[in-house]
Image: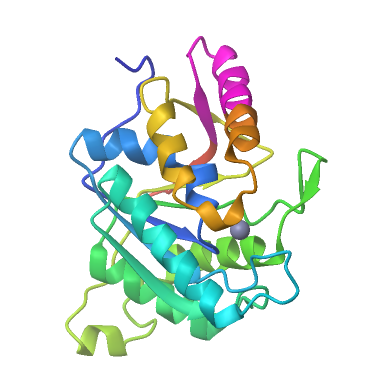
């Protein structure tokens, strides 16, 4: 049994820039919530069509492969659906157009919790540069949550289409330098790794990635006395 006091929301929407972002950042927590009866949907902003170091790779073909891998990874955890907005990989802009599209998804699914990239992070642990698509998607998603989805005069055409304004209660932000919530994923680390393994096109040798992921998850868990953990910046939004 997990040792933390994580609540069990009814619905969780996970918004990510690329296929495999969710598996690295949040899949252990997603697996827990699905197991507790939470309905989870993924919203992928791109199909990862630039995610190759092979200069001769065909972007259209890569997008097809990566979408399929993402759907397999979601199915592995029992996620109920995956939607793709098909913005161009590597060129996501924090635009009003994208905010409208994410707001629509929030108003349609009505999640209590939205998980996404921490948009404030430029350097992750001073180890690597946070991808510009991650920053853009995180920023637009936060803006869609507050105040856009909540206030009825924003994108009022959604209401004409039968949707209602929606207040998200909490944000869970991954790849953060300011984790204030460690989620106990001791029971679901294996399932996180199984989901990540679905992204076959992204790994030359999955064993190296698995070793790194187990080690970092276990080291993070040690801080709280868990076998393994995922860390989030958890923001509880005022009512
Ligand atoms: Zn990414």
x then y, percent, for residue 95: 58, 81
Residue 63 position in % (x across, y down): 51, 74
Judge left or right: residue 159 versus residue 219.
Answer: left
Give the residue furthest to the top. Answer: 225
With respect to residue 19, does 176 lie above or below?
A: above
| Residue at the (81%, 41%) spot, across then down | 127
- The magenta region covers 214-231
* Residue 84 position within the rendered picture, expressed as x and y whole percent measured from the top left: 41, 73
Q: Quadrant of ligand 1?
A: bottom right
Please tell me which residue is depicted at 31% across the width and 33% down the height of the picture.
32
Front-most of residues 236 and 48:
48
The magenta stretch spans residue 101: no
Above or below — where is 100 with respect to 21? below
Horizontal side, residue 27 vs residue 136: left or right: left
Image height of 63 relative to 12, above or below: below
Question: Measuring 57% from the left and 32% from the top, which residue is drawn there?
Answer: 210
Residue sticking out furthest to the right: 126
Front-lying residue, 197 or 100: 197
| Image quadrant assignment for residue 17 | bottom right
Is residue 12 visible in the rendered image? The answer is no
């Amino acid at each position: 049994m997990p040792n933390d006091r994580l609540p069990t929301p009814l619905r969780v929407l996970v918004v990510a820039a690329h296929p495999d972002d969710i598996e690295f950042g949040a899949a252990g927590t997603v697996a827990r919530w699905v197991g507790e009866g939470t309905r989870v949907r993924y919203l992928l902003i791109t199909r990862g069509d630039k995610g190759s170091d092979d200069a001769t790779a065909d972007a259209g073909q890569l997008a097809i492969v990566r979408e399929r891998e993402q759907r397999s990874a979601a199915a592995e955890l029992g996620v109920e659906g995956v939607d793709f907005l098909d913005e161009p990989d590597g060129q996501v802009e924090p635009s009003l157009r994208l905010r409208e599209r994410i707001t629509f998804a929030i108003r349609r699914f009505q999640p209590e919790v939205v998980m996404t990239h921490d948009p404030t992070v430029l350097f992750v642990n001073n180890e690597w540069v946070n991808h510009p698509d991650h920053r853009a998607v995180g920023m637009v998603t936060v803006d869609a949550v507050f105040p856009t989805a909540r206030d009825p005069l924003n994108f009022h055409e959604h209401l004409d289409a039968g949707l209602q304004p929606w207040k998200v209660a909490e944000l869970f932000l991954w790849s953060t330098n300011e984790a204030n919530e460690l989620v106990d994923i001791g029971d679901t680390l294996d399932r996180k790794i199984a989901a990540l393994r679905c992204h076959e096109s992204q790994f030359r040798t999955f064993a190296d990635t698995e070793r790194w992921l187990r080690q970092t998850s276990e080291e993070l868990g040690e801080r709280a006395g868990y076998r393994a953990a995922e860390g989030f910046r958890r923001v509880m939004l005022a009512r």
